[in-house]
């Protein structure tokens, strides 16, 4: 058996001994979220966020859905919907805007995808009324510093 030295410890050559204490800590895994888990009740005062949303506020989450057609091609945000939308919801006055939406603010620009393509968005969950200073768009739920991949 080889003598234990600093070099063999750091390179993992001590008979398969892996010292995980020298490895960087992985990012916290995202909690999974679904559109059906957004609200706990509907009342005369409006929608009430679920306990899961309240618990996950400020935490990284992952959610699958569909990208609504963006407001403009160079936008750094989009709206994630539970069902595919063929038309821009901002551009049609008679379109019913779905109750279950999530605004996704990208951490970096990404190319937008087709509205019928299932994607998974990941980011930090925010809740509460907020108005985007650039667009005037008001949201109740948002993902910040987000990214998405095809699901």
Image: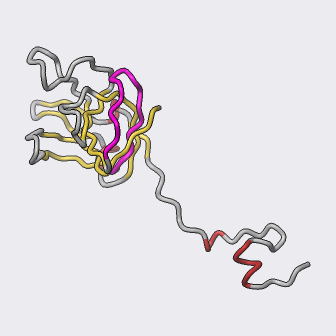
**Picture layout, residue 118 above or below residue 129:** above
User: Residue at point 88% right, 80% down?
Assistant: 2
- Front residue of 149/27: it is 149
Is residue 17 found left or right of 71 in the rendered image? right
User: Residue at point 29% right, 40% down?
Assistant: 50
User: Residue at point 70% right, 76% down?
Assistant: 10
Looking at the picture, how far across and down is residue 115, in whole percent? 33, 23
**Count of picture labels:** 0
Is residue 2 found left or right of 121 in the rendered image? right
Looking at the picture, how far across and down is residue 146, in whole percent? 34, 47
Looking at the picture, how far across and down is residue 147, in whole percent? 37, 44
The quarter holding residue 4 reads: bottom right
In the image, is residue 131 part of the stretch drawn in magenta? no
- Front residue of 65/33: it is 65
User: Residue at point 34% right, 36% down?
Assistant: 111
Looking at the picture, how far across and down is residue 121, in whole percent? 38, 39
Magenta highlight range: 109-124
The quarter holding residue 51 reads: top left
Is residue 109 found left or right of 120 in the rendered image? left
């Amino acid at each position: 058996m080889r003598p234990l030295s600093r070099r063999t410890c750091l390179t993992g050559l001590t008979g398969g001994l892996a010292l995980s204490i020298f490895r960087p800590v992985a990012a916290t895994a995202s909690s999974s979220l679904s559109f059906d888990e957004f609200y706990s009740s509907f009342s005369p005062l409006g929608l009430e966020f679920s306990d899961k949303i309240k618990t996950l506020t400020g935490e990284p989450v992952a959610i699958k859905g569909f990208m609504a057609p963006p407001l403009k091609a160079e936008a750094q945000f989009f709206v994630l919907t539970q069902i595919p939308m063929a038309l821009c919801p901002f551009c049609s006055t008679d379109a019913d805007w779905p109750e279950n939406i999530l605004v996704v603010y990208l951490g970096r620009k990404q190319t937008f995808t087709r509205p019928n393509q299932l994607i998974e968005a990941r980011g930090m969950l925010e809740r509460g009324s907020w108005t985007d200073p650039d667009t005037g768009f008001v949201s109740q739920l948002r993902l910040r510093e987000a990214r998405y991949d095809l699901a």
